[in-house]
């Protein structure tokens, strides 16, 4: 296997977001209120706390906040779940987030509204292909994005999220280390260009961010010249080149709050709009185009797997105890080393500023 070229990633089947959302039950206001109250009682009875990602439906984000839970990015979700005394963690997001919670908290029961909520980055970096690639490049420090399975994390030296990835790579670069990065090629390319580090990239991609179109984005900017383009670094280079702010989900929210401009074009999952509107209610948010030149979108700026999290699946999980996350103990112990390193590094590092261009 040539160290210069990553192996071919598996072809994955991606559900269409609109089809997933079309299967989500619709409730009359009174019925919905009763369902939410039922879930609140189940959480209380089971000493459970709900931890939700910014990309899930606003009903779940609001419910997490109302019940003493937490809404954030994957790094802070992991930290909150690790520090919270609840015996049961309910993770509304995608599978790797539930696995991370179990890696950090083997003594706790970890549930998810559904175990079908996957991540394309995780699926495109299976351990049986990734581990041989690492073994073929023994001179490189293995750094994996948190959007990976427990088995992949177990092979890694470091786990990172987008909020600390640049700082970690700078730290390793300064120590003279060469990097094997997985799985997101766009984020890896962005970090490589920003840090100048010697990085070998796995060729995975996020189905949501990969669909943002540079040409269509430029056209939208011409229509709204007063808007600030903000983008997640999982987006293609043609999108990042136009962005005035590049950052993690938390950093993009902070940009909307802190910047004086009133209009933003947002190149990330539109589930984040709930928090942005909550913190900056007077500002206008526009979706970055995810199709152009006659193309059609699959995710249409919203992750299909995140869309599988809803009130009904959450209630079912709490009623039945189904959809519990289990991680093989031998794998968990190995994955814990790199995952703890992520938390310790982020706790000791100064907050990473929002990347802004002027």
Image (tube, rainbow, N blue to C red):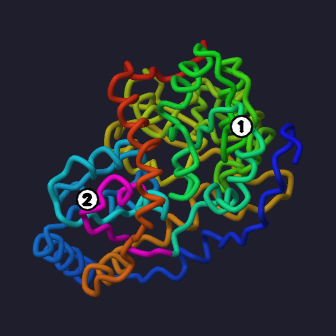
Judged left or right of residue 206, residue 11 is right
**Is residue 63 something that shows in the picture?**
no
151 or 120, which is in the foreground? 151
Judged left or right of residue 215, residue 324 is left
Q: Residues within 10 Å of mark 1 (few under 14, many from 20)?
A: few
Q: Is residue 277 magenta?
A: no
Q: Residues within 10 Å of mark 2 (few under 14, many from 20)?
A: many
Residue at the image point whose x is 39% and y is 70% from the top: 325
Query: How far is disc 1 from disc 2 in space, using C-alphas?
Result: 43 Å
Residue highlighted by disc 1: 138
Task: Write the start and end of the magenta stretch as one range.
Answer: 100-115
Q: Secondary structure at mark 1?
A: loop
Judged left or right of residue 153, residue 316 is left
Residue sticking out furthest to the right: 2
Residue highlighted by disc 2: 64
Q: Is residue 112 magenta?
A: yes
Q: Secondary structure at mark 2?
A: helix
Image coords of residue 31 (percent x, y)? 25, 84
């Amino acid at each position: 296997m040539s160290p210069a070229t990553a192996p071919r990633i598996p072809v994955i089947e991606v559900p269409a977001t609109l089809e997933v959302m079309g299967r989500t039950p619709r409730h009359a206001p009174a019925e919905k209120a009763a369902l939410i109250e039922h879930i609140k009682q189940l959480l209380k009875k089971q000493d459970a706390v709900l931890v939700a990602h910014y990309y899930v439906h606003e009903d779940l984000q609001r419910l997490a906040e109302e019940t003493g839970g937490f809404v954030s990015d994957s790094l802070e979700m992991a930290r909150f779940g690790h520090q919270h005394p609840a015996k049961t963690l309910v993770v509304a997001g995608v599978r790797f987030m539930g696995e991370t919670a179990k890696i950090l908290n083997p003594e706790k029961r970890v549930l998810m509204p559904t175990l079908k909520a996957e991540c394309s980055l995780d699926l495109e970096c299976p351990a049986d292909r990734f581990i041989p690639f690492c073994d073929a490049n023994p001179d490189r420090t293995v750094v994996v994005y948190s959007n990976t399975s427990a088995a992949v994390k177990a092979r890694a030296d470091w786990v990172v999220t987008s909020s600390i990835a640049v700082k970690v790579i700078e730290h390793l670069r300064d120590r003279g280390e060469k990097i094997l990065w997985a799985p997101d090629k766009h984020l890896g390319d962005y970090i490589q260009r920003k840090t100048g580090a010697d990085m070998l990239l796995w060729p995975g991609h996020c189905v949501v961010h990969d669909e943002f179109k540079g040409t269509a984005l430029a056209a939208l900017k011409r229509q709204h010249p007063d808007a600030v383009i903000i983008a997640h670094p999982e987006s293609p280079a043609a999108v990042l080149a136009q962005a005035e702010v590049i950052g993690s989900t938390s950093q993009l929210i902070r940009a909307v709050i802190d910047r004086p401009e009133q209009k933003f074009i947002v190149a990330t999952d539109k589930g984040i709009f709930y928090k942005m509107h909550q913190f900056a209610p007077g500002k206008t948010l526009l979706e970055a185009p995810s199709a152009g030149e006659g193309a059609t979108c699959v995710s249409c700026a919203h992750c299909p797997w995140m869309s599988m999290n809803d009130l009904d699946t959450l209630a079912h999980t709490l009623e039945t105890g189904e959809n519990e996350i289990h991680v093989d103990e031998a794998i968990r112990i190995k994955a814990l080393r790199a995952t703890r390193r992520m938390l310790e590094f982020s706790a000791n590092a100064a907050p990473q500023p929002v990347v802004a261009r002027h």
